[in-house]
Image (spheres, grey):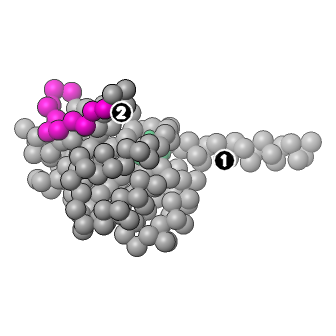
Amino acid sequence: MEFEFFLILFLILIITTVFTGSFYNAIWIPTKKKDYDRIARLSNLKPGMVFCDLGSGNGNMLFYLSKNYGVECIGIEISPFWYFYSKIKSLFYKKVKIIYGNFNKYNLSGVDVVYIFLTDKAPKKLKEKLVKELKENSKIILPCWSFKNIKPTKINKKNKEVSYYLYNKTALSK
Ligand SMILES: C[S@@+](CC[C@H](N)C(=O)[O-])C[C@H]1O[C@@H](n2cnc3c(N)ncnc32)[C@H](O)[C@@H]1O
């Protein structure tokens, strides 16, 4: 009986820590590995640029981009489980910084590319923050859901696959 109790408690703990993000903006669903290069090309990543993933999950995309494109990566994650997982992994990747907490509290002024894979409501919710904090020439990449009534600078479309929308910060300010 005691064993079952602790097992259930343990499972509840794991489930809530893995899915903490669902209480904030989005549940954890990773970006597909095969899309990492599409995202890099769309962002026109160059060594030294700063790429930030709002809600970085397991951080796998950041590890890939830092290694293959020489970019400095920042991941902000609210799920303690994914934070610890990616934080430990980041010890082996000099160019990846993983931060624990709510990305709404993180200032984006030093970022060149922001990646936002959350929900359909996220673009609208985050627009004001992006306009206020990002540098003029920064870029925003949105998978699946674009900003309503703002034309993307570029779209990366593939048959039956996720579409990626690129916006320049200046376009959002208008
Ligand atoms: C759809 S997943 C995307 C994960 C990762 N960006 C990727 O593409 O593989 C969304 C992630 O955002 C995290 N998240 C949701 N709201 C957050 C918030 N306010 N602050 C930080 N992380 C958040 C969730 O825990 C989850 O890991």
Q: Quadrant of residue 135?
A: bottom left
> Quarter for ligand 1?
top left
86 relative position to 40: left or right? right
**Residue placed under numbered mark 2 in the picture:** 162
Give the image quarter of residue 5. Answer: top right
Q: Position of residue 21 (x, y in %)?
A: 49, 42
Provide residue 89's location: percent of width, then percent of height: 52, 65
Which quarter of the figure is the N terminus placed in?
top right
Q: Quadrant of the C terminus?
A: top left
**Where residue 170 sits in the image (x, y, percent)?**
10, 45
Magenta part of the chain: 148-158
From this viewpoint, is residue 142 visible?
A: yes
Per the image, is 56 magenta? no
Q: In the image, is the residue at mark 1 within 8 Å of ligand 1 by its beta carbon? A: no
Rendered view: 78 above or below 149: below
**Residue type at tag 2:** Val
Q: Residue furthest front?
A: 159
